[in-house]
Image: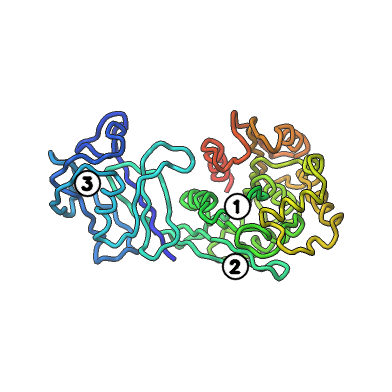
Amino acid sequence: MSVFLGELHAPGSWREELPGGIFSRRTGGKCPLLSSWPSINPGSGSLGRHFRPCWSTGSNGPQSTSHYISHPCPRTTLGSYLNLLLYPYHLAYAHPWRDSLGSSSWGFVAGARSGSHFQEEKANPLFLTLKKVEVKDIRLKADGLELVGELHVPSGDKVHPALCICHGIPAVPPNPTDRGYTLLAQRFCHAGFLTLIFNFRGAGRSEGNLDILGWSRDLQAALDFLYNLEEVDKTRFCLLGFSGGAAVSVYTAAHDPRVSSVATCACPADFRSLSQRETPLDTIQRFRQIGSIRDKDFPPSIEEWKRGFDTVAPIKWIDKISPRPLLLVHGDADEVIPLEHANRLYQKAKEPKELKIMPGARHKMRLEKAAMAFVLDWLKARC
């Protein structure tokens, strides 16, 4: 499936109302009366083409240098304005939004009429660009289980650095409307990374039951899939993991020399705190309640299942990542994995290594704008 990234760009300051009176903080995202509506001519009606129509500003507001249509503009929301602006050219959806990573800029989402995925980026007037980005639904196989994922492929024919993003251990039942990791993948894809996200066994729409050693085999299957893609630069093969997914990333990178760099967020040094808070039987019951353990006869051995967490513990493997670059990102307000876990991992790791402590950041690091910006810049500098 092809999707299109829409960006509106503007010179000047957001602090003052822009010519024409639209897209400004002062109007709160409202569109005042205009006597002319800008429109878009992508050329031959082909959505697959990249185009950059430029807008001029007249006394009645923005006007397209290609052409515009006259239409009375009632005072309406920015979303309605963009829907009407894009509708004649069969773009399915446009709406104002707050950047998922915390930006206060308004933006819009645009995609093919049949699209189920949209590339989302913060947007500013007065220029519009649509960039083609390919999103593929994929299915991986590990231990006979089907794992569900998405591959986000940047535009262009060249090879790209590869990034596999690994989610954490579920704490609540799956929410099909939560597109957090999809948005994150789109952000990294837009930066040039061919990005894979997937659900580990027992999570989301993937089959199986939560098993941390099984997760390491799931990640191995994901890396095999990525590595064999012709679009991938085999020398730039990166991992980004969150919480339990960070632990599995460290374990897997220690055993797989193809991984060229590792970034972790809220990574536990070990899982001892899990066993201190509840018994293994209580933990298994909790995972049953949220749908991560689905088979009534799983695990066949509670002790063996618990031992898997001890085997994967990052503190045992973190020093094996060197000489490849390692980044540890942790919030000093993490309510699940205390900051001392990051300090222990950093002390055990070998160079090159970096520890970034995010003031005020909590456990869900993917929601922390500054943290994700730092990770992206770090990966771009090393991949």
Left or right, 128 with respect to 317, comes to left
Which residue carries the number 1 mark? Answer: 165
Task: Give the CA separation, mark 1 to mark 2.
Answer: 16 Å
Which disc is residue 55 wearing?
3
Q: Locate residue 192, reporting x and y percent.
A: 49, 52
Left or right, 339 with respect to 10, comes to right
Residue type at mark 2 is Arg
Q: Residue at x 16, y 43 (%)?
A: 34
Residue pushed farthest bottom? 144
Q: Rate crowding at label 1 as few (under 14), some (14 to 19) or many (20 or more) other CA atoms within 10 Å.
A: many
Task: Identify which residue, 72 or 341, lies in the foreground.
Answer: 72
Query: Which numbered disc, 1 or 2, marks the residue that appears first in the sequence?
Result: 2
Q: Locate residue 91, reporting x and y percent.
A: 32, 59
Which residue carries the number 2 mark? Answer: 139
Q: Residue at x 19, y 38 (%)?
A: 20
Q: Rate crowding at label 3 as few (under 14), some (14 to 19) or many (20 or more) other CA atoms within 10 Å.
A: many
Q: Rate crowding at label 2 as few (under 14), some (14 to 19) or many (20 or more) other CA atoms within 10 Å.
A: some
